[in-house]
Every structure is written in structure tokens, then in C-alpha cells.
Image: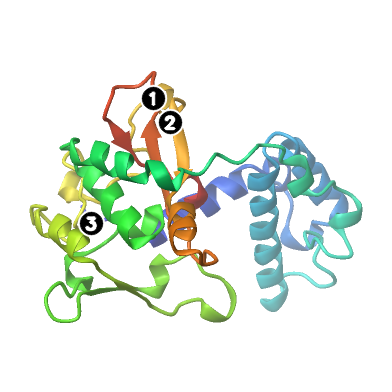
Amino acid sequence: MRDRSPNDDAVTQWDRSLRDLPSLHTLRLHEIDTTHVVKALKAIWWENPISANRTRERLEKVLSAAKVEKFRTGENPAAWRDNLKHLLPSPRKLNKKKGHAAVQYEKAPALMAALAYDGATIARCVEVGILTCTRSQEIRWMEWTELDLVKKKTWPIPGEKMKIKGEGAGKPHLVPLTDQSIAIIQSMRKVGRYVFSSDHAIEHQPLFRQCAGRRDQARRIQRHDARHAHHVSHAQPPTRSARIFSLSPRGRPGRVVLLDQRDA
């Protein structure tokens, strides 16, 4: 069995998005119009507007590709601007979920101390994620071959692993490594290509997004913005955002898990 890659997750997400539009499955590409798209999206638009909008974006790309391949003509019925914008409410306005509180700078040392007492792989993963201010997917998919722990003490993250759109898309991002993060990385067992590999997955695949295990555990997780703590301490505007999750008091004391919902 081959190792999973970020591309595998992308394929899964695309497949899930298109399956969420069953009313379009019986139509040919050239038959789909704005009325069909609105009907399909209304079934999911109010339940989870942000995910529904991602689905719309993917459908728009599919129909754009169909036009290039001469399978359809005319305007794109899934386009937002000058089209669906006037027929559906803004997904951002519908999404009324409040953001999670950021960890206070004064409490950051206590959080790191709690992580140090946790012997699980995920705790080491979170530690390095905080020290490098990287996203969940980037840190979970860290590979040994990407690291220069001796000479340059850097970690060039390949562009395909990053969540950057626009001009910087596809370009590697150079992350400096502190002595503390290097010591943590060097403490990990080399059992495969990934630094933070799962002991429960075949071929030592990287840690999954839902490292907490059961969903009832995941609901007890509070998210904190480690980048905000760095921002407060250094008085610099944040450019990256590393998300970490720690168990609330209802969970086991000292246990820390990682669950980055933004990868979806």
C-alpha cells in the first residue's frame, strides 16, 4: 500500500463535493444552467455555507474545464460574480460561527509545559507546529528528507503541501528551525518517510487530521491560535497561522491533540 499524499486528500474532497450535488448527476454538461445549479446548492447552502461555497467553486471549475474541452458553451452557471451572487445569500454572512479564542501570551509557557508531559507523537507534532508557526497539514506531512537539521537548520516546505493561492502558489516556503524544534524532531523514531507518523496506520502514514480519535472527543477540543501569541510577543502582524488543539477540562488532563478544520 502506497503512502497517502496531500493530493489524495484533495481528490477525496473533490469527490465529496460533487457527490453533494445529486440533482446534477443525471444531466449532461451542456444541459446544466443556473436554475439547476441554484436548486442543487440550496439543498446544502444553509446547512454549512462555507463548505457549500467550496462545492460551488469546484463545480465552477468543472464547468469551466468543460467549456474549454468543447462540452458546453456560454456563461458558467456556477459563477458567483454577476450570477449566483444575486440568487444566494453570501456564505460568509450565513456562517455565524464565532471564532475560537486565541491562547494568551502569558499562558503559552504553561501550554508548552503541558505538552512536554505528554509522551504521544501528536504532542511532539503540536510542539514543533507552535515553534514553527506552521499549519496542521504542513507539520503532519513533514518528511525527513525535507529537513536540514545540521548546516542550515531549515525546513523548506514544498509548495504542493502549502495552502497558498495566487502569486505565491506552488513555491516552497523556507521555515527556520530553532534548537528546541530540532531537538524534538531528532527525538522522533525514524520509522518511515514522515517525522510524525502514526503508529496505528499502515506503512507509518502521517498523522490524520482527526488525531483525537472519536468525534465525541473532538467536540471537547478547544482551538487556540498560536500565531496570535507570537504576534503579541513580537508585536508583528501575523502572516501565517498555526492552529493547535488542547483538550478542555472535561478531557484527560495533559492530553493534547491536533485537529485542523481548515484543511478540509
Percent position of residue 122, x then y? 25, 43
- In front of the other: label 3 or label 2? 2
Tag of residue 237: none
Identity of the amino acid at label 3?
A: Arg
Tag of residue 217: 1
Q: Tell me the residue at 35%/21% (across/down).
A: 251
> Is there any visible trace of residue 25 in the rendered image?
no
Is residue 167 found left or right of 162 in the rendered image?
right
Identity of the amino acid at label 2?
A: Ile
Q: Tell me the residue at 68%/44% (across/down).
A: 21
For residue 42, which quarter of the picture?
Answer: top right
Q: Tell me the residue at 85%/56% (across/down).
A: 84
Task: Give the residue at mark 3.
Answer: 2
Q: Tell me the residue at 73%/61% (across/down).
A: 29
Separation of residues labelled 3 and 1 (CA atoms): 29 Å
In primary-sequence order, the first of circles 3 and 2 is 3
Asked if residue 53 is positioned above or below residue 212 in the image, the reply reads below
User: In the structure shown, which secondary structural element does the residue marked by tag 3 occupy?
Assistant: loop
User: In the structure shown, which secondary structural element does the residue marked by tag 1 occupy?
Assistant: helix
Asked if residue 181 is positioned above or below residue 38 in the image, the reply reads below
Percent position of residue 224, x then y? 46, 43
Task: Give the residue at mark 2.
Answer: 221
Is residue 115 found left or right of 100 in the rendered image?
left
Separation of residues labelled 3 and 2 (CA atoms): 31 Å
- Asked if the residue under mark 2 is in contact with the one under mark 1, i.e. CB atoms within 8 Å, the reply is yes
User: In the structure shown, which secondary structural element does the residue marked by tag 2 occupy?
Assistant: strand
Identity of the amino acid at label 1?
A: Gln
